Image (cartoon, helix red, strand yellow):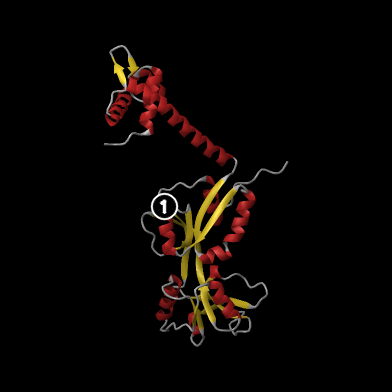
Amino acid sequence: MLPMTLKQLEIFVAVAEQNGFRRASERLNLSQSAVTAHIKLLESHLGVPLFHRTTRTVRMTEAGENLYRRAGRVLEGLEDIVRIFHDEAAMGRGRVLLTSAPSFAATRLPAILARFQGRNPNITVHVREAYATDMLDILRRGDADFAIGPVEKVPREFEFRQFLADGYCAVVTARHPLAGQTDIPLGALTDETILALPLPSRTRIQVESAFQSVGMTLVPHFEMLHHQTLISMAEQGLGVAILPETAVPPAKDGSYWAARIKHPQLTRRIGIITLRGQTLAPGASELANLIAGKKPKAEAPAG
């Protein structure tokens, strides 16, 4: 048996207050037959008649009067909930939950969050760093409004909006012969000591595949879990770190250099990931658009 619905309660209250099915249908802008059908379903679910019906009058039974007292409180409570959320939205309050690839969260996200918080000081943003496979599970559980990250194949239950094509780079100490070069071929790393992320990192798998495509074998001398650790090791001259470009911030003191690696396999798509058909709340939608590079609506000039 189908459960009782809020729509049925709303129709029941309208019939009770209008003392008839026809007047209730006019108030609700429904057909009289639809109103009658909903009331019959509600009575069937509860197992009791809610109205005494004659050809001329409709009045509530004792069970109907009992339900009317409770239904009114339920609908009023629902209206309060809607009003509270509308008020919070109007005042720019709320919370945004997002999950992001660590590389993007570390280098690109802070400046975007600063812009967003400047425009929305009453909205709290919670960021959870995760790798691509974990992101999708986080979205499935409803633990994030949206995700930011790279994907190869997007399952049908998700929507993916790309905003960045992320390449790969070779990070070296400023004293290295490759320092100062903007673009290098993958073959330039043939005799280099390689620093890389460990398996089963998707980045590592992608880099290994690119090496194999040019007849090279990737045998890292050091494997480290975190991007910043690999950058620090390269900075100290321990080898060449191969990382996504989004993972490498500019060296403020010039102590290391990142040269883009030219190879068709060394690129990945970065985008906003949401559940298919999902409608983001206004705050989450604004932040997602900022991340994707869309300009926010112009603010009114200060008076």
Residue sitting at x 66%, y 43%: 300
Q: Is residue 189 left or right of residue 115?
A: left
Occupied quadrant, residue 49: top left
Identity of the residue furthest to the right in this view: 303
Q: Is residue 242 left or right of residue 206?
A: right
The C terminus: image quadrant: top right
Q: Identify the residue at horizontal 62%, vertical 52% (top origin).
A: 117
Of the pair 218 and 198, the residue shown nearer to us: 198
Residue 221 image point, x, y percent = 49, 84
> Where's the N terminus, which quadrant?
top left
Residue 6 on image: x %, y %: 38, 33
Q: Which residue is mark 1?
A: 275
User: For this rendering, which residue is in front, 207 or 113?
Assistant: 113
Q: Quadrant of residue 52?
A: top left
Q: Is residue 186 visible?
A: yes
Q: Residue furthest top?
A: 56
| 259 relative position to 133: left or right | right
Vertical placement of residue 292 versus 73, above or below: below
Q: Residues within 10 Å of mark 1 (few under 14, many from 20)?
A: many
**9 over 245 or under it: above or below:** above
Residue 8 spot, x, y in % from top left: 35, 30
Q: Quadrant of residue 59?
A: top left
Q: Position of residue 30 (x, y in %)?
A: 36, 25
Looking at the picture, does residue 182 appear above or below residue 113? below
